[in-house]
Amino acid sequence: MDDSQRNWAILGKRDENLMHNYYLRMKPSSAEIMNMMKDSFLGIYSTLPPYHD
């Protein structure tokens, strides 16, 4: 895992519980929450500028 992947994983883990608790207030279903979290992280990731070494 290179530095950018490691940093992304750290950010994802750091915000995972915060996002999970936020979505839990809207949807009681764990499956729906995981889909919403996945969509959120993919949306954020897709807006990041390209990374070039």
Image (cartoon, helix red, strand yellow):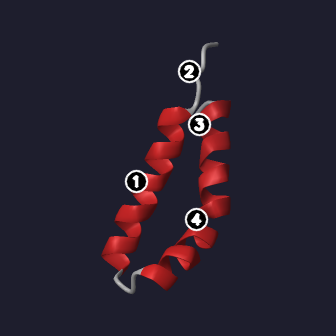
* C-alpha span from label 1 to label 2: 19 Å
Query: Is tag 4's residue or tag 2's residue first in the polypeptide sequence?
Result: 4
The residue type indicated by label 1 comes to Asp
Query: Is tag 1's residue or tag 2's residue first in the polypeptide sequence?
Result: 1
The residue type indicated by label 3 comes to Gln
Identify the residue under disc 3: 5
Question: Residue 2 sits in which quadrant?
Answer: top right
Instruction: Say the numbered circle drawn on residue 18.
Output: none
Q: Nearer the viewer, mark 3 or mark 4?
A: 4
Query: Is tag 3's residue or tag 4's residue first in the polypeptide sequence?
Result: 3
Which element type, helix, strand or loop, lies under badge 2? loop
Query: Is tag 1's residue or tag 4's residue first in the polypeptide sequence?
Result: 4
Residue 12: x percent and y percent? 59, 54
Image quarter where the N terminus lies is top right
Question: At x 61% / y 43%, what residue is drawn?
Answer: 8
Instruction: Say the numbered circle drawn on residue 50.
Output: 2
The residue type indicated by label 2 comes to Pro
Instruction: Say the numbered circle drawn on residue 16.
Output: 4
Which element type, helix, strand or loop, lies under badge 4? helix
Question: At x 56% / y 75%, what residue is drawn?
Answer: 22
